[in-house]
Amino acid sequence: MDESHREVTMTYEELKPRMAGITVQSLEGKDVALKSLWARRRIVLVFLRHFG
């Protein structure tokens, strides 16, 4: 596999300290703390890059 395209799997406890202070936007455009989305249920977190 190309080193620039690798899958990383982490547990919530491993990721929690890295998420402090990170916000994302909801579908309604409101800022939401990322860690609040994962606090009660599992999520799939995907990063997409847009070129163009």
Image (tube, rainbow, N blue to C red):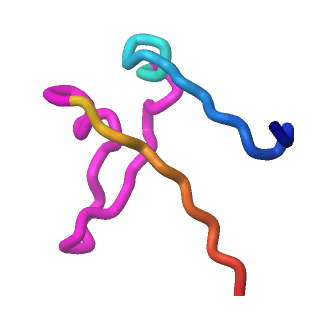
51 sits left or right of 30 in the view = right
* Left or right position of 50 against 28: right
Q: Is residue 38 highlighted in magenta? A: yes
Q: Residue furthest left?
A: 40
Say which quarter of the image contains residue 40: top left
Q: Nearer the viewer, residue 23 or 49?
A: 49
Residue 16 rendering spot, x and y as whole percentages = 42, 21
Where is residue 4 drawn, in percent x and y?
Answer: 82, 45
Residue with the most extreme right position: 3
Relative height, residue 44 to residue 13 (above, below) = below
Task: Estimate the x, y position of residue 45 in percent, counting from the top left.
Answer: 42, 44
Q: Position of residue 43 (x, y in %)?
A: 29, 37
Give the residue displayed 63% in from the left and 75% down from the top.
Answer: 50
Q: Nearer the viewer, residue 26 or 2?
A: 2
Residue bounds of the magenta highlight? 17-41
The vertical placement of 26 against 29, above or below, is: above
Nearer to us in this view, 4 or 20:
4
Front residue (pair 25, 47): 47
Residue at the front extreme, as displayed: 1
Residue pictured at 27% horizontal, 52% vertical: 32
Residue 25 falls inside the magenta stretch = yes
Q: Is residue 40 left or right of residue 9?
A: left
* Rendered image quadrant of residue 1: top right
Toward the bottom, the furthest residue is 52
Which image quadrant is residue 31 in? bottom left
* Residue 4, placed above or below residue 27: above
Q: Quadrant of the C terminus?
A: bottom right
Question: Quick check: 22 above or below 25?
Answer: above
**Is 43 left or right of 11, judged from the image as shown?**
left
